[in-house]
Amino acid sequence: MKKIIYFHGFSSAGSTGTATNLRNYLYDKDVRVLSPDIPVSPSEAVTFLKDFVAAEQPDLIIGTSMGGFYAEMQHGYKRILVNPSFHMAKLLTFRGLGNVDFQNKRADGATHFKVDKQMIEEFKAAEKLSFQDITAEDKALVYGLFGKNDKTVNTQGDFTKHYGKDHFVIFDGEHRLNDKIVKSTVVPLIYQLLEL
């Protein structure tokens, strides 16, 4: 059985519809999709995800938005980064501090969290871990998918600077994935990478 780990975006949860869509499209291909709740604290998230990946040894990691930021750090694994948000500290500073509601149900029952200065500082520290020690092997393992109508983040330049344009893909979509994009863009790439 092949195994995928999906890293969700900011203010989301492992129960996100994208993870459900991936499971639905891959159920007959003997592929298991794991989608954990990522800790709100960036410093906790970095450690949690590194340990989770090491324990599960996935065949592929997919991350969207903030999840793409964290997925980039998982060296040695095939990765798909969808609209990765590599500059979370700047994005959250621009949006402002305060309480944020989770968009999806969290396993621990939490319904909201707080964006504060500490979180922004933790994201600044986590961002220093991005694009570290990238090898030729890593460049061959990482794909960047970017919605041409994404008005939330634009990190295409960051991706191509560090990973080149060989696995750089623009798709007809926005920042958030919908069922149509998962089916038309993400799933075919999964088939290719997992040789399904």
Image: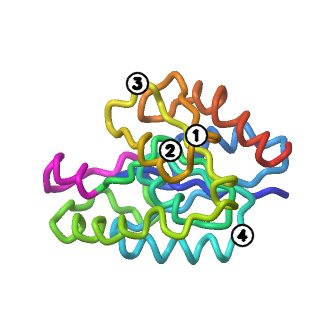
Quadrant in the picture for residue 36: bottom right
Position of residue 40 relative to residue 155, above or below, is: below
Q: Amino acid at mark 1?
A: Lys
Residue 17 is situated, as x and y percent measured from the top left of the image, at: 53, 41
- Stretch in magenta: 89-105
- Residue at which label 1 appears: 165
**Residue name at image x 54 percent, y 48 percent:** 81
Q: Nearer the viewer, mark 1 or mark 4?
A: 1
- Report the Cα–Cα distance between label 1 and label 2: 6 Å
Real-space CA distance between mark 3 and mark 1, rounded to the nearest whole angstrom: 19 Å
Q: Earlier in the sequence, mark 2 or mark 4?
A: 4
Q: Which residue is mark 3?
A: 149
Q: Amino acid at mark 2?
A: Thr
Residue for badge 2: 160
Task: State yes or no: discs 1 and 4 in contact (Cβ < 8 Å).
Answer: no
Rendered location of residue 128, percent (x, y): 36, 69
